Amino acid sequence: MKYLMSLILIAALFVGFTGITWSADAPKIDVAKMFVEKKCNSCHSIDALSITKTNANSKAADLSLVGKVRTSDFLTKYLKKEADIDGKKHGVAFKGTDDEFKAMVAWLAGLK
């Protein structure tokens, strides 16, 4: 019995230290591609990734460094129109799955 308990403890420590999970991996999402497909680049550019906005008249910010000034928590609220920047809500509500939304927020927060 002690041997079995030791094995369980070692396995638990291994999983905890390595970060291995037993659940299926989430599908990989090409967020840069999704950004364009969902027409986010109608208003926003990401110059650092050579993504240009299609509406030249848009005054929306370049998002190349958005992760330096905004947290993922704020981006989540802003894209859900629960927060504002300078008194303005985001122009368009995100349309997509929860996984796509989470991937988009994480990706934007990582732009530094």
Image: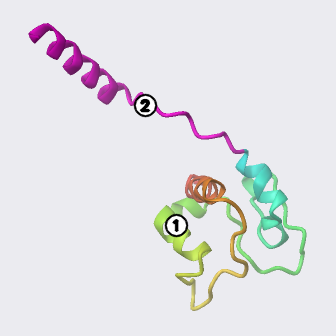
The magenta segment: 1-29
Could you tell me which residue is drawn at 78 percent across and 66 percent down? 40
**Which of the marked residues, 2 or 1, is nearer the chain's N terminus?**
2
Secondary structure of the residue carrying tag 2 is: loop
Q: Position of residue 11 (x, y in %)?
A: 28, 19
Q: Position of residue 37 (x, y in %)?
A: 84, 58
Q: Is residue 5 above or below residue 105?
A: above
Q: Residue 2 falls in which quadrant of the image?
A: top left
Quadrant where the N terminus is found in the figure: top left
Q: Is residue 15 above or below residue 53?
A: above
> To which residue does mark 1 refer?
69
Of all residues shown, which one is farthest toward the top? 3
Could you tell me which residue is drawn at 80 percent across and 73 percent down? 43
Could you tell me which residue is drawn at 51 percent across and 67 percent down? 70
> To which residue does mark 2 refer?
21
Q: CA distance from mark 2 to mark 1?
A: 32 Å
Frontmost of labels 2 and 1 is: 2
